[in-house]
Image (cartoon, grey):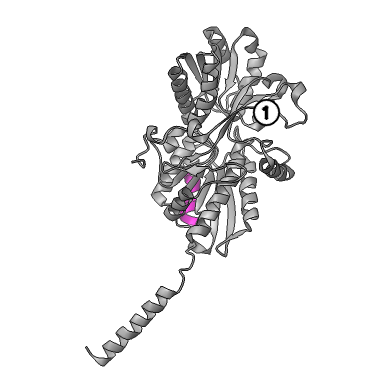
Amino acid sequence: MTAIATTLLGILAGVLSLAATVPARAQISDDVVKLGVLSDMSSLYSEAAGKGSVTAVEMAVADYGGTVKGKPIKVISADHQNKPDVGVGVARNWYDNEQVDVVLDVPNSSVALAVQDLTREKNKLLIISGSGSSDLTGKACSPNGIQWTYDTYALANVAGRATVTAGDDTWFFITADYAFGAALERDASEVVEAGGGKVIGSVRHPLNASDFSSLLLQAQASKAKVVALANAGGDTSTAIRQAAGFGLGRGGQKLLALLMQITDAHAIGLKEGRGLLVTDGFYWDLNDGSRAFAKAFFDKTGRMPTMIQAGLYSATLHYLKAIDQSGTDEAQKVVAQMKATPVNDFFAQNGKVREDGRMVHDMYLFELKAPEESKSEWDLYKLIATVPGDQAFRPLDQGGCPLVR
């Protein structure tokens, strides 16, 4: 070996030795952490999610300090219009051209399923709060997807089990004709039949329907003890109002809204909604933490937060903490850190992100109050039961997720 070669090897060894002693710097792509809130800004889910979802994410970013690992955090948003092709188009542009690191919210399960496929392809991250199909963490699960707030299995399991156990064991479904409605009817039917009940029939309606009269007449004619609404947002509110006009409850049948947000209950009012059972993952008046968050949110929006919006705040903080802890915004490392770290905040105590992407936390069964029981405009629910997460959500080995071994 020549003297020059020996000298070069010595220099290289010194450089490598020095590098080994220097702490690794945070690996933040493009020197910014960019969050994209993909939501329904103008249609039937805009009250439950929409601009309020953007506000919740912005609040979490502000409360975190506006930076992570010394890099700024930026929030952008868009309307997916409840169309999978539009949602995928927005997400693709965000990933390819806007350097978005994570897409959040995505109410509408058809849109979420399509965006989840794209997210896997692009090796980015999707955190779902607004969509409920349990397929998102079942047969369609992804190593790049996390479902934070609720799903159709939990909605069906909590309210359905309580209703069947009380003796209301014949069911008729009024179902939204898209992925979420189909999954909710399927999961609820399984709960009913497992409890010894029977599904008498079902009818489907298009998204954002305005007239439920023929469907309600079929439900009345079925004589089922329970008429279950497997829909959401404006569809649920419209169906409940029209059901009251048909006198459905006065005939001895019970109307059950499998998914209803606090904004839906507020829009319907306690006069028409009293006695309805509701499964929810959050209520503003549960504890000191939920009341503090709700007050801050109310001050910005003039309304109380839904579980979707509260869940987004929680998920955003957990995501940012995972970047801090892992030292990178690379999707797989951040997901691994999120799954390794328990969730403890006003939304979830001892919550956990499972390997299938499901964040497991307590769920709640509420009943809408009678008008005389309410003390203020948003005092709408009374707590019937708290269901631990491992009892509310589908067991890990029963979802068919390929990631579960």
Residue at label 1?
381
Kindly identify the amino acid type of the residue bearing the numbered disc 1.
Tyr
Residue drawn at (54%, 13%) of the image: 168
Residue 81 % position (x, y): 55, 38
Q: Which residues are magenta?
A: 88-97
Magenta highlight on residue 92: yes
Residue 218 % position (x, y): 54, 11
Magenta highlight on residue 27: no
In this rendering, does residue 131 appear at all? yes
Residue 198 % position (x, y): 46, 13
Quarter of the rendering containing residue 32: bottom right
Label 1: how many Cα within 10 Å (few below 14, some 14–19, many 20+): many
Outermost residue, left side:
1
The quarter in which the N terminus is drawn is: bottom left
Viewer-side residue, 403 vs 17: 17
Give the secondary structure at mark 1: strand
Majority secondary structure of the magenta segment? helix
The answer to whether residue 37 is above or below residue 28 is above
Viewer-side residue, 22 vs 98: 22
Residue 163 % position (x, y): 55, 18
Viewer-side residue, 100 vs 270: 270
Residue drawn at (55%, 25%) of the image: 258
The quarter in which the C terminus is drawn is: top left
Residue drawn at (55%, 35%) of the image: 362
Residue drawn at (59%, 34%) of the image: 45
Q: Could you tell whether 125 is left or right of 75 in the image?
A: left
Q: Could you tell whether 371 is left or right of 250 in the image?
A: right
The answer to whether residue 166 is above or below residue 381 is above
Q: How many marks do you count on the picture?
A: 1
The answer to whether residue 72 is above or below residue 210 is below
In this rendering, does residue 212 appear at all? no
Viewer-side residue, 54 vs 321: 321
